[in-house]
Image: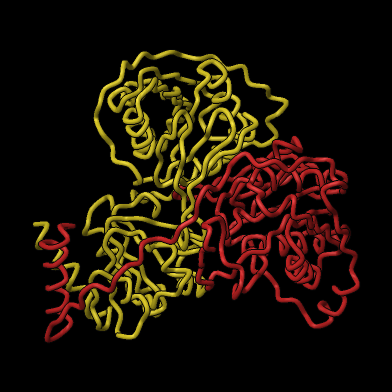
Protein backbone atom coordinates (compact mmCIF):
# COMPACT_ATOMS: atom_id res chain seq x y z
CA UNK A 1 0.00 0.00 0.00
CA UNK A 2 1.33 3.42 -0.94
CA UNK A 3 0.90 6.28 1.45
CA UNK A 4 1.86 9.91 1.85
CA UNK A 5 2.23 11.42 5.30
CA UNK A 6 1.96 15.19 5.64
CA UNK A 7 4.14 16.26 8.51
CA UNK A 8 5.05 19.51 10.22
CA UNK A 9 7.96 20.24 12.47
CA UNK A 10 6.69 22.03 15.60
CA UNK A 11 7.97 23.18 18.99
CA UNK A 12 8.01 20.38 21.57
CA UNK A 13 5.06 20.47 24.01
CA UNK A 14 7.34 21.41 26.91
CA UNK A 15 8.46 24.58 25.10
CA UNK A 16 7.73 27.92 26.75
CA UNK A 17 6.53 30.21 23.98
CA UNK A 18 7.93 33.75 23.68
CA UNK A 19 6.65 36.38 21.24
CA UNK A 20 9.08 38.38 19.07
CA UNK A 21 9.31 42.18 19.63
CA UNK A 22 7.13 43.14 16.66
CA UNK A 23 4.42 40.71 17.77
CA UNK A 24 4.25 38.78 14.51
CA UNK A 25 5.57 35.41 15.57
CA UNK A 26 7.40 33.43 18.20
CA UNK A 27 11.04 33.62 19.19
CA UNK A 28 12.66 30.61 17.52
CA UNK A 29 15.79 30.57 19.65
CA UNK A 30 15.80 28.00 22.41
CA UNK A 31 12.91 26.07 20.88
CA UNK A 32 13.29 22.30 20.70
CA UNK A 33 11.80 21.26 17.34
CA UNK A 34 10.12 17.91 16.93
CA UNK A 35 7.86 16.07 14.50
CA UNK A 36 4.22 16.99 15.19
CA UNK A 37 2.92 14.43 17.74
CA UNK A 38 -0.23 13.71 15.71
CA UNK A 39 1.86 13.43 12.52
CA UNK A 40 3.88 10.74 14.30
CA UNK A 41 0.72 8.64 14.54
CA UNK A 42 0.33 9.15 10.78
CA UNK A 43 3.87 7.96 10.06
CA UNK A 44 3.42 4.93 12.31
CA UNK A 45 0.11 3.97 10.70
CA UNK A 46 1.61 4.31 7.21
CA UNK A 47 4.46 1.99 8.23
CA UNK A 48 2.09 -0.55 9.80
CA UNK A 49 -0.08 -0.62 6.67
CA UNK A 50 2.97 -1.10 4.46
CA UNK A 51 4.09 -3.96 6.72
CA UNK A 52 0.65 -5.53 6.62
CA UNK A 53 0.49 -5.43 2.82
CA UNK A 54 4.18 -6.35 2.55
CA UNK A 55 4.52 -3.84 -0.28
CA UNK A 56 4.33 -0.16 -1.01
CA UNK A 57 6.05 3.09 -0.37
CA UNK A 58 5.72 5.65 2.42
CA UNK A 59 6.51 9.22 1.38
CA UNK A 60 6.73 12.08 3.86
CA UNK A 61 5.71 15.55 2.67
CA UNK A 62 6.65 18.58 4.73
CA UNK A 63 6.62 22.35 4.27
CA UNK A 64 9.24 24.13 6.32
CA UNK A 65 12.64 25.79 6.49
CA UNK A 66 16.05 24.06 6.58
CA UNK A 67 15.54 22.83 10.15
CA UNK A 68 12.50 20.77 9.06
CA UNK A 69 14.89 18.23 7.54
CA UNK A 70 15.55 16.94 11.08
CA UNK A 71 11.92 15.92 11.55
CA UNK A 72 11.86 14.52 8.00
CA UNK A 73 14.93 12.42 8.80
CA UNK A 74 13.20 11.19 11.96
CA UNK A 75 10.34 9.91 9.82
CA UNK A 76 12.75 8.28 7.39
CA UNK A 77 14.61 6.70 10.32
CA UNK A 78 11.31 5.28 11.61
CA UNK A 79 11.02 3.55 8.24
CA UNK A 80 9.53 5.90 5.62
CA UNK A 81 11.03 5.42 2.16
CA UNK A 82 11.31 8.91 0.72
CA UNK A 83 10.39 12.52 1.38
CA UNK A 84 9.38 15.75 -0.32
CA UNK A 85 10.66 18.84 1.47
CA UNK A 86 9.06 22.06 0.28
CA UNK A 87 11.64 24.55 1.44
CA UNK A 88 10.88 28.05 0.20
CA UNK A 89 10.54 31.13 2.40
CA UNK A 90 7.90 32.43 -0.02
CA UNK A 91 5.68 29.65 1.34
CA UNK A 92 6.55 28.78 4.90
CA UNK A 93 7.05 32.24 6.37
CA UNK A 94 3.41 33.31 6.32
CA UNK A 95 1.62 30.14 5.29
CA UNK A 96 -1.85 29.82 6.80
CA UNK A 97 -3.76 26.52 6.60
CA UNK A 98 -5.09 27.27 3.11
CA UNK A 99 -1.66 28.15 1.74
CA UNK A 100 -0.09 25.12 3.43
CA UNK A 101 -2.71 22.79 2.00
CA UNK A 102 -2.43 24.25 -1.52
CA UNK A 103 1.35 23.83 -1.47
CA UNK A 104 1.11 20.28 -0.11
CA UNK A 105 -1.58 19.40 -2.67
CA UNK A 106 0.69 20.56 -5.50
CA UNK A 107 3.64 18.65 -4.07
CA UNK A 108 1.85 15.30 -3.60
CA UNK A 109 -0.69 15.24 -6.43
CA UNK A 110 1.55 13.23 -8.77
CA UNK A 111 2.69 10.73 -6.15
CA UNK A 112 1.07 7.31 -5.87
CA UNK A 113 -1.06 6.86 -2.78
CA UNK A 114 -3.98 4.90 -1.40
CA UNK A 115 -4.12 7.03 1.74
CA UNK A 116 -2.76 10.44 2.67
CA UNK A 117 -2.24 10.69 6.41
CA UNK A 118 -2.14 13.99 8.28
CA UNK A 119 -1.99 14.69 11.98
CA UNK A 120 -5.39 15.91 13.22
CA UNK A 121 -3.74 19.26 13.89
CA UNK A 122 -0.30 20.79 14.12
CA UNK A 123 0.30 21.69 17.74
CA UNK A 124 1.73 25.12 16.88
CA UNK A 125 -1.15 26.98 15.21
CA UNK A 126 -3.74 24.38 16.32
CA UNK A 127 -5.90 25.13 13.28
CA UNK A 128 -6.79 21.56 12.32
CA UNK A 129 -7.79 22.65 8.82
CA UNK A 130 -5.15 21.31 6.45
CA UNK A 131 -6.68 17.81 6.03
CA UNK A 132 -10.06 19.27 4.99
CA UNK A 133 -8.60 21.79 2.55
CA UNK A 134 -6.24 19.20 1.10
CA UNK A 135 -9.23 16.92 0.53
CA UNK A 136 -11.12 19.67 -1.24
CA UNK A 137 -8.16 20.55 -3.47
CA UNK A 138 -7.42 16.93 -4.38
CA UNK A 139 -11.08 15.89 -4.60
CA UNK A 140 -10.68 13.21 -1.94
CA UNK A 141 -12.89 12.24 1.01
CA UNK A 142 -11.55 13.29 4.42
CA UNK A 143 -12.06 11.49 7.71
CA UNK A 144 -10.73 13.37 10.73
CA UNK A 145 -9.78 12.16 14.23
CA UNK A 146 -9.11 8.60 13.14
CA UNK A 147 -8.37 6.11 15.95
CA UNK A 148 -8.56 2.83 14.00
CA UNK A 149 -8.00 1.84 10.39
CA UNK A 150 -8.69 -1.37 8.52
CA UNK A 151 -7.90 -1.32 4.83
CA UNK A 152 -9.63 -3.94 2.66
CA UNK A 153 -7.32 -6.36 0.85
CA UNK A 154 -8.22 -4.87 -2.51
CA UNK A 155 -7.42 -1.37 -1.21
CA UNK A 156 -10.64 -0.03 -2.72
CA UNK A 157 -12.23 0.65 0.63
CA UNK A 158 -11.31 1.12 4.26
CA UNK A 159 -13.25 0.89 7.49
CA UNK A 160 -12.31 3.75 9.74
CA UNK A 161 -13.17 4.48 13.36
CA UNK A 162 -13.16 8.15 14.28
CA UNK A 163 -13.61 9.93 17.57
CA UNK A 164 -16.85 11.88 17.87
CA UNK A 165 -18.35 13.72 20.81
CA UNK A 166 -18.92 11.24 23.62
CA UNK A 167 -17.96 8.16 21.60
CA UNK A 168 -16.94 7.01 18.16
CA UNK A 169 -18.30 6.47 14.66
CA UNK A 170 -17.48 3.72 12.20
CA UNK A 171 -17.19 4.87 8.63
CA UNK A 172 -16.69 3.09 5.36
CA UNK A 173 -14.70 5.21 2.94
CA UNK A 174 -13.56 4.63 -0.61
CA UNK A 175 -9.85 5.00 -1.27
CA UNK A 176 -7.84 7.02 -1.92
CA UNK A 177 -8.77 9.13 1.08
CA UNK A 178 -7.25 11.58 3.52
CA UNK A 179 -7.20 10.44 7.14
CA UNK A 180 -6.26 12.69 10.05
CA UNK A 181 -4.68 10.82 12.93
CA UNK A 182 -5.83 11.19 16.52
CA UNK A 183 -4.03 9.93 19.61
CA UNK A 184 -5.01 6.30 20.21
CA UNK A 185 -4.52 5.23 16.56
CA UNK A 186 -1.29 3.44 17.45
CA UNK A 187 1.89 3.66 19.50
CA UNK A 188 4.62 5.28 17.36
CA UNK A 189 7.91 3.37 17.22
CA UNK A 190 11.26 4.86 18.01
CA UNK A 191 13.83 5.06 15.26
CA UNK A 192 16.39 2.27 15.55
CA UNK A 193 20.09 2.90 15.16
CA UNK A 194 20.26 1.05 11.81
CA UNK A 195 17.16 3.04 10.82
CA UNK A 196 18.94 6.28 11.61
CA UNK A 197 21.96 5.22 9.53
CA UNK A 198 19.77 4.21 6.58
CA UNK A 199 17.74 7.44 6.75
CA UNK A 200 20.79 9.46 5.78
CA UNK A 201 20.81 7.80 2.36
CA UNK A 202 17.10 7.93 1.63
CA UNK A 203 15.98 10.35 -1.10
CA UNK A 204 14.64 13.79 -0.10
CA UNK A 205 13.23 15.78 -3.00
CA UNK A 206 13.63 19.47 -2.19
CA UNK A 207 11.11 21.71 -3.92
CA UNK A 208 10.86 25.47 -4.22
CA UNK A 209 7.94 27.68 -5.27
CA UNK A 210 8.82 27.60 -8.97
CA UNK A 211 8.62 23.78 -9.03
CA UNK A 212 5.02 23.65 -7.87
CA UNK A 213 3.10 26.21 -9.90
CA UNK A 214 0.97 27.48 -7.00
CA UNK A 215 0.92 30.92 -5.43
CA UNK A 216 0.60 29.62 -1.87
CA UNK A 217 -1.46 32.68 -1.02
CA UNK A 218 -2.88 32.88 2.50
CA UNK A 219 -6.54 33.49 3.25
CA UNK A 220 -5.97 34.64 6.81
CA UNK A 221 -3.52 37.12 8.28
CA UNK A 222 -2.10 37.15 11.78
CA UNK A 223 -2.21 40.80 12.85
CA UNK A 224 -0.62 40.49 16.24
CA UNK A 225 0.41 37.83 18.72
CA UNK A 226 0.42 38.12 22.48
CA UNK A 227 0.93 36.04 25.58
CA UNK A 228 -1.98 35.16 27.86
CA UNK A 229 -2.19 37.21 31.04
CA UNK A 230 0.03 35.60 33.68
CA UNK A 231 -1.84 33.78 36.44
CA UNK A 232 -0.83 34.53 39.99
CA UNK A 233 -0.58 31.90 42.66
CA UNK A 234 -3.62 32.22 44.89
CA UNK A 235 -4.05 31.11 48.45
CA UNK A 236 -3.14 27.87 50.12
CA UNK A 237 -6.02 26.47 52.14
CA UNK A 238 -4.90 25.81 55.70
CA UNK A 239 -6.29 23.31 58.18
CA UNK A 240 -5.36 20.86 60.92
CA UNK A 241 -5.99 17.84 58.73
CA UNK A 242 -7.23 16.89 55.27
CA UNK A 243 -10.89 16.97 56.32
CA UNK A 244 -10.63 20.50 57.66
CA UNK A 245 -8.88 21.59 54.48
CA UNK A 246 -11.62 19.98 52.39
CA UNK A 247 -14.27 21.86 54.38
CA UNK A 248 -12.37 25.14 54.08
CA UNK A 249 -11.96 24.62 50.33
CA UNK A 250 -15.68 23.93 49.86
CA UNK A 251 -16.44 27.08 51.86
CA UNK A 252 -14.05 29.15 49.73
CA UNK A 253 -15.58 27.83 46.51
CA UNK A 254 -19.04 28.63 47.85
CA UNK A 255 -18.49 32.00 49.50
CA UNK A 256 -15.50 33.56 47.73
CA UNK A 257 -15.59 32.08 44.26
CA UNK A 258 -19.40 31.59 44.32
CA UNK A 259 -19.07 28.44 42.25
CA UNK A 260 -21.20 26.13 44.37
CA UNK B 1 -22.84 45.36 9.04
CA UNK B 2 -22.64 42.23 6.86
CA UNK B 3 -25.19 39.46 7.27
CA UNK B 4 -24.21 36.52 9.48
CA UNK B 5 -25.13 32.89 8.83
CA UNK B 6 -24.91 30.38 11.67
CA UNK B 7 -24.54 26.62 11.57
CA UNK B 8 -26.88 25.27 14.24
CA UNK B 9 -25.58 21.91 15.42
CA UNK B 10 -27.89 19.22 16.75
CA UNK B 11 -26.73 16.47 19.12
CA UNK B 12 -29.02 14.00 20.87
CA UNK B 13 -32.09 15.79 19.57
CA UNK B 14 -31.13 19.20 20.90
CA UNK B 15 -29.41 22.28 19.53
CA UNK B 16 -25.98 22.69 21.13
CA UNK B 17 -25.52 25.50 23.63
CA UNK B 18 -22.53 26.66 21.58
CA UNK B 19 -24.83 27.31 18.63
CA UNK B 20 -26.99 29.56 20.82
CA UNK B 21 -23.83 31.32 22.01
CA UNK B 22 -22.79 32.21 18.46
CA UNK B 23 -26.38 33.22 17.61
CA UNK B 24 -26.35 35.59 20.60
CA UNK B 25 -23.00 37.01 19.50
CA UNK B 26 -24.27 37.52 15.94
CA UNK B 27 -27.33 39.36 17.27
CA UNK B 28 -25.12 41.58 19.41
CA UNK B 29 -22.98 42.51 16.40
CA UNK B 30 -26.11 43.70 14.54
CA UNK B 31 -27.14 43.09 10.96
CA UNK B 32 -29.26 40.28 9.59
CA UNK B 33 -28.84 36.98 11.48
CA UNK B 34 -29.66 33.74 9.65
CA UNK B 35 -29.21 30.20 10.87
CA UNK B 36 -29.14 26.85 9.11
CA UNK B 37 -30.11 23.67 10.91
CA UNK B 38 -29.47 20.27 9.31
CA UNK B 39 -30.63 16.81 10.37
CA UNK B 40 -33.52 14.38 10.42
CA UNK B 41 -36.61 15.49 12.33
CA UNK B 42 -35.02 18.79 13.34
CA UNK B 43 -37.65 21.20 12.03
CA UNK B 44 -39.37 21.45 15.42
CA UNK B 45 -36.14 22.75 16.98
CA UNK B 46 -35.81 25.68 14.58
CA UNK B 47 -37.93 28.24 16.51
CA UNK B 48 -35.50 28.02 19.46
CA UNK B 49 -32.91 29.83 17.37
CA UNK B 50 -35.25 32.82 17.04
CA UNK B 51 -35.16 33.29 20.82
CA UNK B 52 -31.48 34.16 20.65
CA UNK B 53 -31.67 36.42 17.65
CA UNK B 54 -32.11 34.48 14.41
CA UNK B 55 -34.17 36.49 11.91
CA UNK B 56 -34.35 33.69 9.39
CA UNK B 57 -33.90 29.96 9.92
CA UNK B 58 -33.20 27.60 7.05
CA UNK B 59 -34.19 24.00 7.77
CA UNK B 60 -32.61 21.10 5.90
CA UNK B 61 -34.53 18.10 7.15
CA UNK B 62 -34.45 14.59 5.76
CA UNK B 63 -33.51 10.99 6.49
CA UNK B 64 -30.31 11.35 4.46
CA UNK B 65 -29.10 13.77 7.14
CA UNK B 66 -29.82 11.53 10.10
CA UNK B 67 -26.15 10.79 10.77
CA UNK B 68 -23.61 13.59 10.47
CA UNK B 69 -21.33 13.12 7.47
CA UNK B 70 -19.31 16.15 6.43
CA UNK B 71 -19.74 15.93 2.65
CA UNK B 72 -23.55 15.85 2.72
CA UNK B 73 -23.74 18.51 5.43
CA UNK B 74 -21.27 20.76 3.61
CA UNK B 75 -23.24 20.46 0.37
CA UNK B 76 -26.46 21.37 2.19
CA UNK B 77 -24.98 24.31 4.07
CA UNK B 78 -23.12 25.59 1.00
CA UNK B 79 -26.42 25.63 -0.91
CA UNK B 80 -28.01 27.75 1.83
CA UNK B 81 -24.95 30.02 1.94
CA UNK B 82 -25.27 30.48 -1.83
CA UNK B 83 -28.79 31.83 -1.27
CA UNK B 84 -28.09 33.91 1.83
CA UNK B 85 -24.72 35.29 0.66
CA UNK B 86 -23.58 36.08 4.21
CA UNK B 87 -20.53 38.24 4.88
CA UNK B 88 -19.72 36.14 7.93
CA UNK B 89 -20.34 32.50 8.94
CA UNK B 90 -20.22 31.35 12.56
CA UNK B 91 -20.03 27.80 13.85
CA UNK B 92 -19.38 26.49 17.33
CA UNK B 93 -15.96 24.80 17.64
CA UNK B 94 -17.40 21.61 19.12
CA UNK B 95 -16.07 18.19 18.15
CA UNK B 96 -18.37 18.22 15.12
CA UNK B 97 -17.73 21.90 14.41
CA UNK B 98 -14.01 21.23 14.15
CA UNK B 99 -14.71 18.62 11.47
CA UNK B 100 -17.40 20.58 9.62
CA UNK B 101 -16.03 24.12 9.54
CA UNK B 102 -12.73 23.62 7.67
CA UNK B 103 -14.51 21.42 5.13
CA UNK B 104 -17.22 24.04 4.61
CA UNK B 105 -14.69 26.87 4.25
CA UNK B 106 -12.66 24.84 1.76
CA UNK B 107 -15.82 24.22 -0.31
CA UNK B 108 -16.52 27.98 -0.30
CA UNK B 109 -12.88 28.51 -1.37
CA UNK B 110 -12.03 30.61 1.66
CA UNK B 111 -9.97 30.07 4.78
CA UNK B 112 -11.59 29.71 8.15
CA UNK B 113 -10.34 30.82 11.54
CA UNK B 114 -10.70 28.07 14.09
CA UNK B 115 -11.50 28.00 17.77
CA UNK B 116 -11.86 31.76 18.27
CA UNK B 117 -12.31 33.06 21.82
CA UNK B 118 -13.16 36.67 21.00
CA UNK B 119 -14.29 38.65 18.01
CA UNK B 120 -14.74 42.30 17.10
CA UNK B 121 -15.63 44.23 13.96
CA UNK B 122 -13.21 46.48 12.14
CA UNK B 123 -15.37 48.12 9.48
CA UNK B 124 -17.04 45.31 7.56
CA UNK B 125 -14.39 42.79 8.57
CA UNK B 126 -14.33 40.72 11.73
CA UNK B 127 -11.08 40.27 13.60
CA UNK B 128 -10.84 37.21 15.82
CA UNK B 129 -8.69 36.36 18.79
CA UNK B 130 -7.63 32.73 18.93
CA UNK B 131 -5.25 30.66 21.01
CA UNK B 132 -2.19 28.99 19.48
CA UNK B 133 0.22 26.50 21.04
CA UNK B 134 -2.74 25.22 23.09
CA UNK B 135 -3.10 28.60 24.77
CA UNK B 136 0.56 29.45 25.38
CA UNK B 137 0.00 32.38 22.99
CA UNK B 138 -2.86 34.27 21.35
CA UNK B 139 -3.17 35.76 17.89
CA UNK B 140 -5.44 38.41 16.41
CA UNK B 141 -6.39 37.10 12.99
CA UNK B 142 -8.25 38.58 10.05
CA UNK B 143 -9.80 36.52 7.28
CA UNK B 144 -9.25 37.78 3.76
CA UNK B 145 -11.90 35.64 2.06
CA UNK B 146 -15.57 36.34 1.42
CA UNK B 147 -17.40 35.10 3.40
CA UNK B 148 -15.30 35.15 6.54
CA UNK B 149 -15.71 31.87 8.40
CA UNK B 150 -15.14 31.51 12.13
CA UNK B 151 -15.56 28.61 14.51
CA UNK B 152 -16.03 29.90 18.04
CA UNK B 153 -14.87 27.99 21.10
CA UNK B 154 -17.76 26.96 23.37
CA UNK B 155 -18.19 29.08 26.54
CA UNK B 156 -16.55 32.12 24.88
CA UNK B 157 -19.74 34.16 24.64
CA UNK B 158 -22.83 34.22 26.87
CA UNK B 159 -26.25 33.08 25.71
CA UNK B 160 -28.63 36.06 25.65
CA UNK B 161 -32.32 35.90 24.96
CA UNK B 162 -33.00 38.60 22.40
CA UNK B 163 -35.59 37.63 19.85
CA UNK B 164 -35.10 37.77 16.11
CA UNK B 165 -37.83 37.69 13.47
CA UNK B 166 -37.59 33.90 13.29
CA UNK B 167 -38.97 33.26 9.80
CA UNK B 168 -38.59 29.58 8.94
CA UNK B 169 -37.81 28.34 5.44
CA UNK B 170 -37.58 24.68 4.51
CA UNK B 171 -34.85 24.01 1.99
CA UNK B 172 -34.74 21.10 -0.42
CA UNK B 173 -31.19 20.05 -1.08
CA UNK B 174 -30.16 18.14 -4.17
CA UNK B 175 -27.20 16.14 -2.95
CA UNK B 176 -24.51 15.30 -5.47
CA UNK B 177 -24.13 11.71 -4.34
CA UNK B 178 -21.13 11.12 -6.63
CA UNK B 179 -19.10 13.22 -4.18
CA UNK B 180 -20.21 11.26 -1.12
CA UNK B 181 -17.45 8.69 -0.73
CA UNK B 182 -17.83 7.97 2.96
CA UNK B 183 -20.76 6.24 4.66
CA UNK B 184 -21.35 6.34 8.40
CA UNK B 185 -22.04 2.73 9.38
CA UNK B 186 -22.69 3.23 13.05
CA UNK B 187 -22.23 5.73 15.83
CA UNK B 188 -21.64 4.59 19.37
CA UNK B 189 -22.12 7.19 22.04
CA UNK B 190 -21.58 6.36 25.69
CA UNK B 191 -24.77 6.52 27.74
CA UNK B 192 -23.15 9.14 29.95
CA UNK B 193 -24.91 12.47 30.21
CA UNK B 194 -21.64 14.26 30.94
CA UNK B 195 -20.80 17.22 28.73
CA UNK B 196 -17.66 17.20 26.58
CA UNK B 197 -14.64 18.57 28.41
CA UNK B 198 -14.45 21.54 26.03
CA UNK B 199 -18.01 22.52 26.93
CA UNK B 200 -18.16 21.61 30.62
CA UNK B 201 -18.54 24.32 33.26
CA UNK B 202 -16.69 22.31 35.90
CA UNK B 203 -13.92 19.75 35.37
CA UNK B 204 -12.41 17.53 38.06
CA UNK B 205 -9.19 16.16 36.66
CA UNK B 206 -6.81 13.46 37.84
CA UNK B 207 -3.12 12.89 37.18
CA UNK B 208 -0.29 10.57 38.10
CA UNK B 209 -1.17 11.04 41.78
CA UNK B 210 -4.35 9.03 41.20
CA UNK B 211 -2.10 5.94 41.27
CA UNK B 212 -4.41 3.72 39.20
CA UNK B 213 -7.57 3.54 37.08
CA UNK B 214 -9.69 2.18 39.95
CA UNK B 215 -9.24 5.41 41.92
CA UNK B 216 -10.90 7.70 39.39
CA UNK B 217 -14.22 6.82 41.02
CA UNK B 218 -13.55 9.46 43.69
CA UNK B 219 -13.15 12.28 41.16
CA UNK B 220 -16.18 11.04 39.23
CA UNK B 221 -18.16 11.23 42.47
CA UNK B 222 -16.99 14.78 43.07
CA UNK B 223 -17.83 15.81 39.50
CA UNK B 224 -21.31 14.28 39.70
CA UNK B 225 -21.93 16.15 42.94
CA UNK B 226 -21.51 19.42 41.05
CA UNK B 227 -24.32 18.52 38.66
CA UNK B 228 -24.89 17.93 34.92
CA UNK B 229 -22.53 20.66 33.69
CA UNK B 230 -19.54 18.94 35.31
CA UNK B 231 -17.28 16.22 33.98
CA UNK B 232 -13.89 14.64 34.63
CA UNK B 233 -10.53 15.06 32.92
CA UNK B 234 -7.07 13.53 33.07
CA UNK B 235 -3.45 14.52 32.61
CA UNK B 236 -1.28 13.07 29.85
CA UNK B 237 0.52 10.96 32.45
CA UNK B 238 -2.75 9.30 33.47
CA UNK B 239 -3.76 8.70 29.85
CA UNK B 240 -0.35 7.40 28.78
CA UNK B 241 -0.44 5.00 31.74
CA UNK B 242 -3.68 3.61 30.28
CA UNK B 243 -5.80 4.67 33.25
CA UNK B 244 -8.14 6.90 31.25
CA UNK B 245 -9.22 7.10 27.65
CA UNK B 246 -7.60 9.81 25.52
CA UNK B 247 -10.98 11.56 25.21
CA UNK B 248 -10.42 12.73 28.80
CA UNK B 249 -6.94 14.17 28.25
CA UNK B 250 -6.53 17.88 29.00
CA UNK B 251 -3.44 19.61 27.65
CA UNK B 252 -1.52 20.27 24.47
CA UNK B 253 -2.03 16.83 22.94
CA UNK B 254 -5.51 16.54 24.39
CA UNK B 255 -8.28 19.05 24.87
CA UNK B 256 -7.88 22.74 25.59
CA UNK B 257 -10.52 23.63 28.14
CA UNK B 258 -11.87 26.77 29.73
CA UNK B 259 -14.37 25.84 32.45
CA UNK B 260 -15.52 28.06 35.31
CA UNK B 261 -13.83 25.69 37.75
CA UNK B 262 -10.95 23.29 37.18
CA UNK B 263 -9.97 21.01 40.06
CA UNK B 264 -6.58 19.35 39.47
CA UNK B 265 -6.08 16.28 41.68
CA UNK B 266 -2.62 14.77 41.82
CA UNK B 267 -1.50 16.73 38.75
CA UNK B 268 1.95 18.31 39.02
CA UNK B 269 1.38 20.84 36.23
CA UNK B 270 3.63 20.16 33.23
CA UNK B 271 3.85 23.06 30.77
CA UNK B 272 1.73 21.23 28.20
CA UNK B 273 -1.00 20.63 30.81
CA UNK B 274 -0.98 24.19 32.13
CA UNK B 275 -1.35 25.45 28.55
CA UNK B 276 -4.48 23.37 28.07
CA UNK B 277 -6.36 24.57 31.16
CA UNK B 278 -4.75 27.94 31.91
CA UNK B 279 -7.81 29.95 30.88
CA UNK B 280 -10.08 28.23 33.41
CA UNK B 281 -11.77 30.93 35.47
CA UNK B 282 -10.91 29.36 38.84
CA UNK B 283 -8.23 26.71 39.32
CA UNK B 284 -7.98 24.48 42.38
CA UNK B 285 -4.94 22.26 42.94
CA UNK B 286 -4.89 19.32 45.33
CA UNK B 287 -1.43 17.78 45.57
CA UNK B 288 0.72 16.53 48.41
CA UNK B 289 3.87 18.02 46.85
CA UNK B 290 3.90 21.70 47.88
CA UNK B 291 6.55 22.35 45.19
CA UNK B 292 4.32 21.17 42.32
CA UNK B 293 4.21 23.83 39.54
CA UNK B 294 0.41 23.63 39.44
CA UNK B 295 0.26 25.66 42.69
CA UNK B 296 1.78 28.68 40.91
CA UNK B 297 -1.34 28.84 38.68
CA UNK B 298 -3.96 27.82 41.22
CA UNK B 299 -6.39 30.23 42.85
CA UNK B 300 -6.86 27.78 45.70
CA UNK B 301 -4.32 25.17 46.70
CA UNK B 302 -4.57 22.26 49.10
CA UNK B 303 -1.27 20.65 50.04
CA UNK B 304 -2.31 17.21 51.17
CA UNK B 305 -3.02 13.67 50.05
CA UNK B 306 -5.80 13.82 47.46
CA UNK B 307 -7.24 10.52 48.73
CA UNK B 308 -7.85 12.19 52.09
CA UNK B 309 -9.12 15.48 50.63
CA UNK B 310 -11.39 14.56 47.71
CA UNK B 311 -13.95 12.29 49.48
CA UNK B 312 -14.67 14.78 52.30
CA UNK B 313 -14.74 17.59 49.72
CA UNK B 314 -17.48 15.68 47.89
CA UNK B 315 -19.44 15.45 51.15
CA UNK B 316 -18.98 19.18 51.85
CA UNK B 317 -20.16 20.11 48.36
CA UNK B 318 -23.22 17.88 48.83
CA UNK B 319 -24.00 19.66 52.10
CA UNK B 320 -23.73 23.11 50.54
CA UNK B 321 -25.85 22.15 47.57
CA UNK B 322 -28.38 20.72 50.01
Could you tell me how many numbered marks the image carries? 0
Q: Is residue A75 visible?
A: yes
Left or right for A150, reference B291: right
Q: Is residue A172 visible?
A: no
Residue B31 rendering spot, x and y as whole percentages: 38, 22
Left or right for B299, reference A133: left
Describe the colour scheme in one phrase: by chain
**A200 vs A127: above or below:** below
Pick the front one: B57 or B215 = B57
Left or right for A255, reference A60: left
Residue located 44% across and 34% down the image: B122
Residue A224 rendering spot, x and y as whole percentages: 50, 51
Q: The C terminus of chain B is located in which quarter?
A: bottom left
Left or right for A20, reference B306: right
Q: Quadrant of residue B2?
A: top left
Pick the front one: A88 or B46 = A88
Residue B178 rendering spot, x and y as whole percentages: 73, 25
Residue A166 rendering spot, x and y as whole percentages: 44, 50
Residue located 75% across and 35% down the image: A139
Q: The N terminus of chain B is located in which quarter?
A: top left
**B270 vs A83: above or below:** below
Q: Colour of chain A?
A: red
**A94 vs A253: above or below:** above
**B75 vs A18: above or below:** above
Chain identifier of the yellow chain? B
Residue located 28% across and 37% down the image: B159
Residue located 39% across and 55% down the image: B197
Q: Quadrant of residue A141?
A: top right
Residue, far front: A22
Amino acid sequence: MNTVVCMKQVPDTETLIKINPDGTGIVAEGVKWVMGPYDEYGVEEALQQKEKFKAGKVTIASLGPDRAIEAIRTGLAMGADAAVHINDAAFYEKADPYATASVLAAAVKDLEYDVIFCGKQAIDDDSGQVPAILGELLGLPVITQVIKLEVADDKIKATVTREVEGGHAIIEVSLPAILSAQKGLNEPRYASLPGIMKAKKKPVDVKIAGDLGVSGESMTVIKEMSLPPARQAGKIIEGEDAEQKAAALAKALHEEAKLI
Amino acid sequence: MPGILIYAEVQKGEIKKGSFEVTSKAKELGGEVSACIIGSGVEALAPELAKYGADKIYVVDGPEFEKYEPEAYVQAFAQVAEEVKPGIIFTSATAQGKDFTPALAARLKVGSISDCVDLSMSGDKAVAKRPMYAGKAYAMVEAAGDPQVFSIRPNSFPVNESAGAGAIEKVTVNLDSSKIKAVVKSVEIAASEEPDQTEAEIIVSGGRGMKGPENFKIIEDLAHTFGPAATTGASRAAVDAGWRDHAYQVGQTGKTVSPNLYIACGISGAIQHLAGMGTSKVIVAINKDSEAPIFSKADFGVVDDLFKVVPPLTEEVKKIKG
